[in-house]
Amino acid sequence: MIRGIALIVAAGAVALASAGPGLAQAQQLRIVVVPSLSLTSYAPRGAVGLLVPGAGPRVSRRAALAALVRGRLEHSLLGGTPGGPPLVELGGPAGQATVYVALPPEGERPNDRRYPVAVVGPGWSGLLVSPSTRIDGLVSVVDIAPTALGRRNGLRSRAHGSAPEELARLDRRIARNGDSRLPATLVVAALVGLFAFLRPRAALLAFALALATDVVLGLLAVSRPTVVVAVMAVAVGTGSLVLERVLRTRLSLGLALAAAVAVVAVALAAAPESVALSPLGPSQSGRFYGLSNLLATLLLVPVLAGVTLLRTRPPLAVALAGAGLALVAANRLGADGGGTLVLLAGLLVLALRLSGRRLTPHAVGLLALTAACLGAALVGLDALAGGSSHVTESLASGPRGLAGDLADRVELSARRAVSSWGAGLIVVAGLTALAVYGLRRPRFPVSDALLAAVAVSLVVNDTPTDVAGLGALACACAWHWQVSRAGRAV
């Protein structure tokens, strides 16, 4: 009899496993999709939030529903609708708590709107807190399934006396940042491009000031496009010229660049939401926290040029390099796996060139292997310290998962490059400029390091306009700075 029971249990386990992961854990919360939802009405009965229904520039109701029940996303430029078995079912009998969620209407539309979501039941009140977004009140569609299953990576709630008003402010801020991002980026690019040829030292400071100004705007919750663009223009334009006259020595210039890196690091450590919700930060349409590729590209100049300027004081140079890596790699700070490899590549090439060695094919291969090993080690140490992000999850999936993730990024990057004539023009112009400075003589350590970093970034990151455009400007800035009188002194 015992043997018969054991066979029945074993057969049940096999059937359960073959039925799919959705049936392996009982659904604890009911999920109800509603046409509309009033946050003011639901807030007194539970916890409320704003839901991002997809990833990428477009979204559809079909894709949002697929992501909701499967607990996973697919970028809209890669199809938008995730496959695989569902984890949860919609509707069902009433339980202790119910998730009410509104989704986009039928048809495809821009992914620039957030939809109301509420969890009603015992223990739920105030704002919904998501491990996916790390922004109180902002929820990803992939949070719904693990919440309904009662998993540790599901939603939680935080008490808040005026949750609907707070969500309205959050929604306005995200929308305004979306409107500010392009004009603010163009202002920074125009000023850097101008300074690179006329005042190269000011161009270095412009990169640093753009980073610091963005963080300060995030800390002050300034998001109106006109104000953001005006402040960025004055701070980067006027500030760079003023500081160029004040900072006359290599040490003072290096310390100023290091100070900008420190400002970003302190802001991410003390108030990570301020950077996530800054004008040049993540778009909140798939990437929610840490450094955006735009900010990570801006960061390359102050770190690489700063290390070069401070190399006669090794402790300062090593501290800046370490701070830059920690800023990009740490899950609680930048959480940017691609950015980690990019900065590592730049620092390794910089060290090689500052030592007087040439970039031979053998040296390039060795540097690539070293960067990959160090990058994996940094992310692994961060995971052991309790960090968890899309980077650690990708590493945990093994070589096959990493290869798949990289293939997706390359495809996504290619699709973004041809998504519009404007994007294609920026990418072509950026790649052309990078080729020009890659072949230009004489060769200098910082410009070579930036070329290597941007080359890696074009492979491992998925925003080619940011990387190719700003990366080309960074290389131009570094080359003209080094070829100038001040550059020859370093």
Image (spheres, helix red, strand yellow):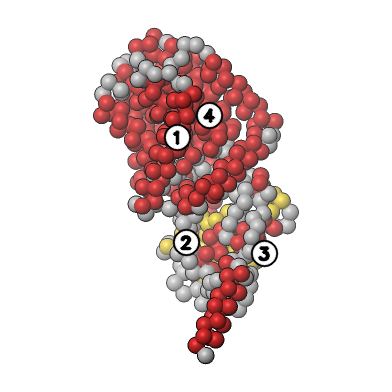
The residue located at (41%, 64%) in the rendering is 159
Q: Amino acid at mark 2?
A: Asn
Q: Amino acid at mark 1?
A: Leu
The residue located at (46%, 32%) in the rendering is 368
Q: Amino acid at mark 4?
A: Ala
Q: Which mark is residue 369?
A: 1
Residue at label 2? 153
Q: Percent position (x, y) of residue 48?
A: 51, 63
Precedes in sequence: disc 4 or disc 3: 3
| Mark 3 secondary-structure assignment | loop
Residue at label 3? 35
Alpha-carbon span between mark 2 and mark 3: 27 Å
Q: Percent position (x, y) of residue 489?
A: 34, 11
Q: Percent position (x, y) of residue 306?
A: 36, 25
The residue located at (54%, 78%) in the rendering is 10
Alpha-carbon span between mark 1 and mark 3: 52 Å
Q: Quick check: marks 2 and 1 in contact, CB under 8 Å?
A: no
Task: Count neighbours of disc 2 (C-alpha within 10 A) and say few if under 14, some if 14 to 19, many if 20 or more.
Answer: some
Can you see residue 309? yes
Task: Count neighbours of disc 3 (C-alpha within 10 A) and say few if under 14, some if 14 to 19, many if 20 or more.
Answer: few
Closer to viewer: mark 4 or mark 2: 4
Alpha-carbon span between mark 4 and mark 2: 35 Å
Q: Amino acid at mark 3?
A: Pro
Alpha-carbon span between mark 2 and mark 1: 34 Å
Precedes in sequence: disc 2 or disc 3: 3
| Mark 1 secondary-structure assignment | helix
Can you see residue 31? no
Residue at label 4? 455
Closer to viewer: mark 1 or mark 3: 1
Classify residue 326 by image quadrant: top left
Q: Is residue 457 left or right of residue 82?
A: left
Alpha-carbon span between mark 4 and mark 1: 15 Å
